Image: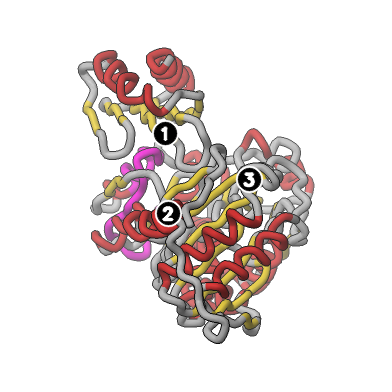
Amino acid sequence: MKQSIPPDLIVSVSGIRGIIGESLTPAVASAFAAAFGTWAGGGKIVVSRDSRPSGDMLRHAVIAGLVSTGCSVIDIGIAPTPTCGIAVQHLKAAGCIQISASHNPAPWNGLKMFGPEGGVLTAAAGAEVRGMFESGDAKSAAWNALGTVTVPPDVLHVHVERVCEQAGVAALHSMAYRVFVDGNGGAGGPLAMTLLQELGCEVIDHACAADGQFVHEAEPIPAHLENVGPLVARSEAAIGFALDPDADRLVLMDETGACVSEELTLALAVKYRLSQKPGPVVINMSTSRVIEDLARAAGTICIRTAVGEANVVAGMREYNAVIGGEGNGGVIDPRVGWIRDPFIGMALILHLMAESRMKLSELVASLPPYAMLKTKCPVAREKLSAAFKTLEKRWPDAMVNWLDGLRLDWKDRWVHVRSSNTEPIVRVIAEAPTIEEAQALCDQATECLR
């Protein structure tokens, strides 16, 4: 039966996202899970969730939808999003539904889909699930063909082992770094503490219980970490790590407590990985040009894709990339999994500090200097096409790229305007030599959108 989809529910090729009790209800979650189960053909499906209190309610709805199609559900409980991808591979499942709204505020939640290789669904596969959800063409298994629910042994240790296999554990043990971790009540705090202790670090934890009690805004960006940074300096830690609720983004704080731009998490991880093994790097259209500079210095190529984890992963596969990711603090290392993983990011950056014998603040200062500004504004989707044409005419000297919205490039700066996949807004992102120049680009682009 065709679904009556709430108008404020965000439906994309990667899943759904909405406000609990308004656009995202148990009925919607169950119907979406049934569509995914139908697409998966009734195989084994991993179900997981981040620590938001609404996740347990949605878990019941998701399991009901999957079981109704004949899927066998493997319930791994509260786990970081990258652990879900590893669980799919480890348990030989046909896919996974992670119940999470990522960086959205506490009233939100959502469902995110993974395919059999442990990465988020491709755009084509996601579109198939979306079509089944919107049309209501989900399968209904007979009474004697319904699925089952099982709980496997703990899979978090598998994730820790995978990261440790790629980390020089002995070298990090010799450094005995004191490390601060802000889990913000999300799913990643316990795993971060376990991993860092395995790497020989002394861990100072802050809100690392996976209880869903956010102590600051969910998105880990410098503006939301102003009260956390001073704790890093006070604890005399060498570095501070901050996670988002489902733990697929990583933001850094240096030894002075200064919050580092989320764009530089990937840059530092790339810098170390390319020192190990030069090779192609893949990033999205909105990620800092610092990555391009680092790749060029290492004698390799940097490829840009449309925004979205699935698009970056597809590019990484196509070019056999050694590392990739997104400028929101998302590091993707294919040796561990095809998904943004802050835990391998932690290991890579600690290694960079150890081998360079430099403080984090010194490493940040050594990167190519750019200033980036990320803004957003409400624009009706039907007006975007005309607005893009106005933008193109505004800067006739720019190099134009239509791969994902509109990106305009110059020798030392760029601006990217695109509709968000996760919020009902348009994102305007600019990077330039100074913050004033980036601000000017954002202001002028926003004026063209009005």
Q: What's under tag 3, amino acid-wise?
A: Met
**Closer-to-camera residue (372/212):** 212
Q: Is residue 288 magenta?
A: yes
- Badge 3: how crowded within 10 Å, few (<14), some, or many (20+)? many
Q: Earlier in the sequence, mark 1 or mark 2?
A: 2
Query: What's the residue at 30%, 16% (across, down)?
Result: 390
Q: In terms of depth relative to the viewer, which is nearer, 212 or 273?
A: 212
Residue range in magenta is 269-294
Q: Amino acid at mark 1?
A: Ser
State the residue at coordinates (25%, 34%). 402
Q: Nearer the viewer, residue 404 or 235?
A: 404
Q: Label 2 sits on what residue type?
A: Ser
In this rendering, the label closer to the viewer, 2 or 3: 2
Label 2, secondary structure: give it. Answer: helix
Query: Residue tagged by mark 2?
Result: 135
The disc at residue 253 is: 3
Neighbours of disc 2 within 10 Å: few (<14), some (14-19), many (20+): some
Question: Between residues 140 and 355, which one lies in front from this camera angle?
Answer: 140
Residue 154 placement (x, y as % from top left): 65, 80
Residue 19, compared with residue 429, is above or below; it is below
Write down the residue under mark 1.
419
